[in-house]
Image (tube, rainbow, N blue to C red):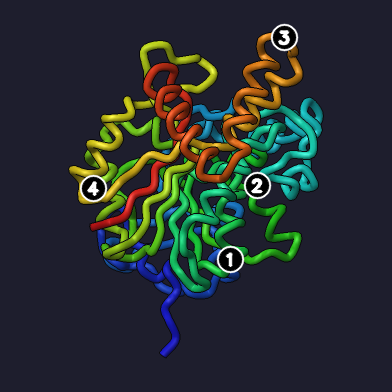
Amino acid sequence: MNRPRVIERLLCPHCGRMGFSGLSDLDRCLSERSLSCAECSKEYGVVDGIIDFCGRRGSLSGVNYDAPGWRAAERNRERMYETANEFNDEWLLSLPFPSRGTDTTFHSGGGAIGRNFLDLMQTIRLESGETVLDLAAGTAWTSREFARRGCDVVCTDIRTIKYHGLRSAEAYINAGEKGFYRICWRFGPIPFLSETFDLVCCQSAFQYVDSLEQMVAEIRRVLKPGGLFLLPWTGVTAPFKSAKWGPGHRLHEYLGAFRKGGFDARACPPLALYQQSIEVLRSRGGIALLLARLWSAVTLRSEAAQSAAAKILGGAMSRLFGAPTNFICTRR
């Protein structure tokens, strides 16, 4: 018996029931302009292959999505990005190590965010055919990485604009890579049946959740027993936090919410962040160069020494200065 596609377990956000049909045909779903629930007759738009479960979004990325003609405004904004930042499909295909352009919260020219994610992928067991929900996926390069590993992927984000949001995935699909479903959705009740996913990922975005407890409960609900909740590069609030690391909750608040919500959870500092910082220190000379050499002297002895040093430094940096961290949570 063939394993059903994960999208077939989609729920109508309005009535909470499985009222959609024909979703197992990806190409057909992407070509439709609307999706109708057979249970409550609620209709949802499908724009550029993206299922719209958000409805009214207000202004995002310089586009008023509640105004008539927002699609034209969105395209104009995309052209502005292409002119000002030299963004194009080639740039999207270079992610997570962008060939040019400005740094964003999803990827950086230094490559630390990308290296961190790929490092985490090496530490988890992910098999072909497993189901993945990629929350707040942005340009969806993380979704592409899961799809490349043979996973059945659904990604979400409130932003659809290309180079920031879900329309970015068109570059991957046009290049012949495996497709995945995209849903315009904001944090809240997850529109899928319970115990649907093997893995839920949320990179660089869980710091924007207002109620950790409610969102953690939803994620636990849609995960299968033993499923994994992966949070790469997550913002943390701290007494001396640098503004460049954005918003977040305190480290103990995250861990408390995960454990109370039914997860075995641990924080793992992003080693790639500190490796990139050391490269910067080396370039500055003086006392900075001495600190870089000291770090290298300690960490180059073994991988265990490197991991231990990063854990000690990373924990202190997150608690005191709000440096981003990773969380790996297993559903009990």
Q: Earlier in the sequence, mark 3 or mark 1?
A: 1
Label of residue 149 in the image: 1
**Residue 63, placed above or below residue 95:** above
Instruction: Name the residue beneath numbered marker 3.
Output: 286
Which residue is at 42% across, 81% downward?
3
Q: Amino acid at mark 1?
A: Arg
Instruction: Name the residue beneath numbered marker 2.
Output: 168
Q: Earlier in the sequence, mark 3 or mark 2?
A: 2
Q: Nearest the camera: 214 or 160? A: 214
Contact? badges 1 and 4 (CB < 8 Å): no
Does residue 128 appear to the left or right of 264 in the view shown? right
Contact? badges 4 and 3 (CB < 8 Å): no
In this rendering, the label closer to the viewer, 1 or 4: 1
Taking the view exactly as shown, the residue that stands out farthest to the top is 286
SS state under label 4: helix
In this rendering, the label closer to the viewer, 2 or 1: 1
Contact? badges 2 and 4 (CB < 8 Å): no
Q: How many angstroms separate mark 3 from mark 2 (CA)?
A: 43 Å
Which residue is at 69% across, 64% downward?
177
Q: Position of residue 309 (x, y in %)?
A: 49, 32
Q: Amino acid at mark 3?
A: Gly
Contact? badges 3 and 2 (CB < 8 Å): no
Q: Nearest the camera: 25 or 314? A: 314
Instruction: Name the residue beneath numbered marker 4.
Output: 217
